[in-house]
Amino acid sequence: MAEFSDKIQDLMDEVYNEWRKDNNKGKWDVLGEFSVAHQIAVTFGNFNYQVENGGIEQWIYNGYFQDDAEKFIEFLEIGAETDDRCRNILDKVYQLDQYTHETDCDRYGNFYDSDNDGDSSFIGDIINCDKFDSWYYENCGKEDWWGIVCGIIDKAEARLALSEQHEHTAAEKPAQKESVLDKIHEAMAQPKQPHKPKSQDKSEPEL
């Protein structure tokens, strides 16, 4: 059964059909208008397509790493709670992400390397890309893998719903009445008023 991969493909198609209407928008400008399920499907789908066709080096060089790394790490962390494959991918992407902050690489993964006579180096060189690709071809891209990705979607949606429920509950919670102790503290914080003697005029009753 290909229900898992079909679900991912359907979600990706919905995003890209919308994106084609306005190609001037950035991918995440479009994705930001879609659900977390769509975001996960596109992020994992793009990764799979790039790695399957040209290895993780292609994913980096074509700008997907720069575009997706932050969200991809977030989604992989959910999957890594239960799946070793997510942990392995997360480890590589996290290494790349950390190193980009140290090297200030460009969109295509190239950076100025002061240790290499000033020549440009490729950020993918910090991991064994060939070894990762071989592992990925053997373990990912199959139906059980897409089942894991669909499981990540379910978890992410459940957590989002719970977060929204907590925010909604907090917004509806009535304000607590001011306690007697709060009133005392508030009164003590007020500046003292000068004492005014009572009026000696007895023409009118005192109130």
Image: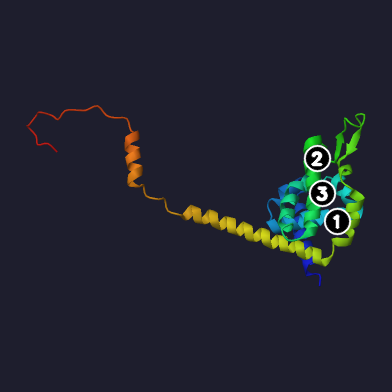
Which numbered disc covers residue 174?
none
Q: Position of residue 6 (x, y in %)?
A: 79, 66
How many angstroms separate mark 3 from mark 2 (CA)?
Answer: 11 Å
Whether residue 176 is visible: yes
Q: Earlier in the sequence, mark 3 or mark 2?
A: 3
Give SS at disc 3: helix
Residue 92, numbered label: 3
The residue that label 2 is drawn on is 99
Classify mark 1: helix, strand or loop. helix
* The disc label shown at residue 49, or none: 1
Image marks 1 and 3: residues in contact by CB distance under 8 Å = no
Q: Amino acid at mark 2?
A: Tyr
The location of residue 122, given as percent across then percent down, is: 89, 40
First of labels 2, 1 by sequence position: 1
Q: Answer few, some or many: residues within 10 Å of disc 1's Cα (few below 14, many 20 plus, some between 14 and 19).
A: some
Write the residue at 50% across / 56% down: 169
| Location of residue 25 in the rendering, given as x and y in whole percent from the top left corner | 75, 46
* Placement of the C terminus among the 4 image quadrants: top left
Q: Of tags 1 and 3, which is closer to the observer?
A: 3
Which amino acid is tagged 1? Answer: Tyr
Residue 108, percent from left and from top: 85, 41
The answer to whether 94 appears left or right of 192 in the picture is right
Pick the residue in front: 111 or 83. Answer: 83
Q: Is residue 176 left or right of residue 94?
A: left
- Name the residue located 81 percent from the left edge and 72 percent from the top edge: 1
Residue positioned 71% across, 56% down in the render: 78
